[in-house]
Amino acid sequence: MNRRAIGRLVAGVAAAAAFVWAARAAENASMPEFKVYDGFWMMLGSAIAVALVAPAVWSWPRERSLLVVVIASIVGSVVPLAISALRHSLPLMARLKGSWMIAGADLVGPAIVIGFACLWFALRDEVPGSRS
C-alpha cells in the first residue's frame, strides 16, 4: 500500500467512526415520549443534501468540492429543524437552541460534518499534477 491508499483508508475509518458517533449521540439524545428525534432528522437531512450536491461537484477539484459538501451537510442538518420550527409555529432560533441544548444537536451536528468531510477525502483522490 502506498501513502495515498493508507490516507484514504484512514479517512474512511474516520468517516465511519464519525457516523457511528453521530448515530449513537442521536439515539442517546432522542426522546421517544415527546417524539423528538432531532439527531436522526439531522442525519437524514444532511445525507439527502450531500447526495444532491455530490454528483454536481464530483468533477471539481477536491478542495472546492469539499467546501460545497461541508456546506451542504451543515445546511442539510439544519433544514429539518427549521421545518419543524415552522410546522410547530416556533421561533427558529429558539428551536435551534433547544435542539442544541437538549436534543443532542451539539454532538450530532459536528459529527455529521466531520463524517462527510472524511468520507469525501476517502472517496476523492487528489491525483498529483492534475490541479485545475
Image (cartoon, grey):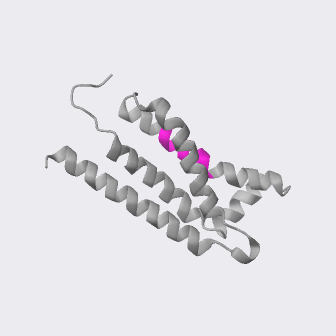
Residue at the left extreme? 1
Question: Residue at (48%, 37%) from the top-left corner?
Answer: 54
Question: Residue at (61%, 50%) from the top-left corner?
Answer: 45
* Magenta stretch: includes residue 75: yes
Left or right, residue 66 beside residue 76: left
User: Image height check: is 56 above or below 71?
Assistant: above
Question: Residue at (21%, 47%) from the top-left corner?
Answer: 5
Q: Nearer the viewer, residue 21 or 96?
A: 21
Q: Please provide percent x and percent y for residue 73.
A: 54, 47
Quadrant into which the C terminus falls = top left
Question: Residue at (27%, 48%) from the top-left corner?
Answer: 8
Left or right, residue 81 beside residue 122: right
Q: Please provide percent x and percent y for residue 113.
A: 49, 52
Residue range corresponding to the magenta coloring: 68-77
Residue at the bottom extreme? 33
Rendering quarter of residue 130: top left
Main secondary-structure element of the magenta-colored stretch: helix
Rendering quarter of residue 49: top right
Q: Please provide percent x and percent y for residue 112.
A: 50, 55
